[in-house]
Amino acid sequence: RWYFDECLKNGRSLDDLLGPSPNSNSLFRNKSFILTVTFEGKSTKIPDYGTHQVPFFKDHLQKQIVDGGGKVYEHWEDLPKSKYSNCKLIAPFPCTTAKYIQCLATGIYAVSHEWIIESCKMGKTVDFKKYLLPSGYSIIEKRYIAPVVKRVSTNSRAFSGLNILLTSENKDFTDFWSRVCKLAGASSVQSVKSVDDISTIEKGFLLVGGEVSAVLIEKAKDFDISVVSTVWVVQSLIAGICCNADSHESLTKFFTDDC
């Protein structure tokens, strides 16, 4: 609120700050959008990603897009696969929201909200490439990673050809991360409930959610299956390739139940 008050004191209107709504419904015609935002955590060890000059005002951005002929999908599940190729994720900075993660998995570009604002101010769709956001922060390389070239097929995505097992008592965990792994090109994604579910499969990964039996961990290792956390998934998506599970301790950090 203080930001708007200060700017208005200087004689600037809201349209000056956030951009006007388009007069033409052709500005974003045939384009699809997903919007996401989260608070920048102060306790995180990840360094801030620069500064965005204009606040992210979701309702105003959505109105600008719709008035410009674009389509905003509130939920990822509502976005048809046929729209992936012309969809953009709008955010103020790189983050790890569910929408951001799924867009990384699919190869949908994340673009700063300032692209929408500038396009509305100019009355034409400006080049979005200047407003591309990083894929995210690599804890392995200790830097923000530039977006990977858009992947139009599952054959060129981070988990292309991988076999991935998941184990968790939480159905939401299993449903979400199964979807993410499939979007990222995994050839096989299976849920594991007990040691009997682990059989002779090709070398793959076991994704763990919550506490997991130490016996299950040992069984996976016997079959040369790397046991990983969701951090491994996110870091692989950021890098655009499958990360080595041993490249950072956080990729394999989980809790075991020794009982």
Image: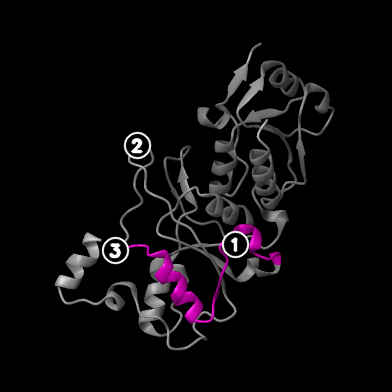
- On screen, residue 60 above or below 256: below
**Which region of the structure is painted magenta?**
54-81
Name the residue beneath numbered marker 2. 43
**Of the residues under marks 3 and 1, which one precedes in the sequence?**
3
**Contact, mark 1 vs mark 2 (Cβ under 8 Å):** no
Kindly identify which numbered label has been placed on residue 196. none
Where disc 1 sits, the SS reads loop
**Contact, mark 2 vs mark 3 (Cβ under 8 Å):** no
Which quadrant of the rendered structure holds the N terminus?
bottom left
Q: Distance from label 3 to label 1 (Cα)?
A: 27 Å
Report the residue at 64% width, 60% height from top.
151
* Image quadrant where residue 163 sits: top right
Instruction: Please indicate whether residue 39 sits to the left or right of residue 250 in the image.
Output: left
**Contact, mark 3 vs mark 1 (Cβ under 8 Å):** no
| Neighbourhood count class around disc 1 (C-alpha, 10 Å): few under 14, some 14–19, many 20 upward | some
* Image quadrant where residue 86 sits: bottom right
**Of the residues under marks 2 and 3, which one precedes in the sequence?**
2
Q: Distance from label 1 to label 2 (Cα)?
A: 32 Å
Where disc 2 sits, the SS reads loop
Which quadrant of the rendered structure holds the C terminus?
top right
- On screen, residue 26 above or below 9: below
Name the residue beneath numbered marker 3. 53
Q: Which residue is nearer to you in this view: 172 or 132?
A: 172
Instruction: Please indicate whether residue 120 sits to the left or right of residue 225 in the image.
Output: left
Q: Name the residue type under label 3.
A: Gln
Q: Which residue is nearer to you in this view: 59 or 213?
A: 59
Report the residue at 41% width, 56% height from top.
93
Task: Measuring from the top left, give residue 14's x and y in whole percent.
Answer: 28, 75
- Residue 50 is one of the magenta-drawn residues: no
Q: Distance from label 2 to label 3 (Cα)?
A: 22 Å
